[in-house]
Image: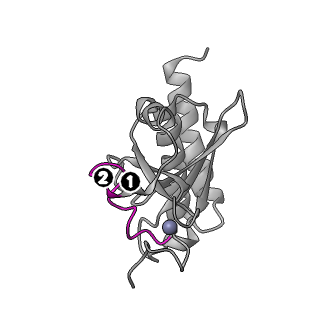
């Protein structure tokens, strides 16, 4: 077990290295690094179990573009994909992506601020149309999310 000071130093080094080496520039690099660190802390995982990607479906082409962060369980290899819709707002919850009950595309299915939120979601049966229509059944971003297939009844109204 490393000390808190050592882990804090490693986190700062991780941000600086990611910022310097990110293929989309230092600002995106810092957003991705900070998002990865925040998700690792929220789930109690080491940073090497988190990867990040650009979210090409939800791009805004402005500061703070959405970041996709994938957490891999070190024991089972199971992957969970989270959306940081506004990565500059570090108080925002992550949106766990999962299959839409209608189109099966990956869309926001739960808010996750910490491990307990993920545990609550995993304890539930798979989402159904009833959940979509129930207040609090899915995040409010579900209905208009750009991740839905074009033929889905839900999705970006634009
Ligand atoms: Zn859908």
Q: Residue at x 36, y 62 (%)?
A: 141
Q: CA distance from mark 2 to mark 1?
A: 6 Å
Check if residue 19 falls in the magenta segment. no
Disc number for residue 130: 1
Q: Which residues are magenta?
A: 133-146
Q: Judging from the image, what secondary structure is the residue with disc 2 in?
A: loop
Q: Residues within 10 Å of mark 1 (few under 14, many from 20)?
A: few
Identify which residue, 147 or 6, lies in the foreground: 147
Q: Position of residue 17 (x, y in %)?
A: 62, 49
Identify which residue, 141 or 152, lies in the foreground: 152
Q: Which residue position holds label 2?
A: 134
Which secondary structure class fits the magenta region best?
loop
Q: Judging from the image, what secondary structure is the residue with disc 1 in?
A: helix
Identify which residue, 104 or 3, lies in the foreground: 104
Disc number for residue 47: none
Q: Is residue 67 left or right of residue 85?
A: right
Identify which residue, 57 or 23, lies in the foreground: 57
Q: Position of residue 109 (x, y in %)?
A: 45, 52
Q: Residue at x 56, y 51 (%)?
A: 69
Q: Position of residue 150 (x, y in %)?
A: 54, 79
């Amino acid at each position: 077990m490393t000390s808190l000071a050592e882990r804090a130093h490693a986190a700062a080094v991780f941000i600086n290295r990611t910022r310097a080496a990110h293929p989309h520039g230092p600002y995106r690099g810092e957003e991705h690094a900070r998002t990865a660190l925040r998700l690792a802390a929220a789930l109690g995982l080491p940073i090497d179990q988190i990867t990040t990607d650009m979210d090409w479906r939800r791009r805004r082409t402005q500061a703070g573009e959405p970041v996709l962060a994938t957490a891999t369980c070190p024991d089972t290899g199971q992957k969970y994909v989270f959306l940081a819709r506004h990565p500059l707002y570090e108080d925002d919850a992550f949106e766990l992506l999962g299959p839409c009950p209608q189109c099966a595309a990956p869309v926001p299915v739960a808010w996750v601020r910490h491990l307990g939120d993920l545990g609550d979601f995993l304890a539930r049966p798979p989402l159904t149309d009833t959940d979509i229509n129930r207040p609090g059944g899915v995040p409010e971003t579900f209905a208009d999310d750009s991740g839905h297939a074009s033929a889905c009844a839900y999705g970006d109204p634009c």
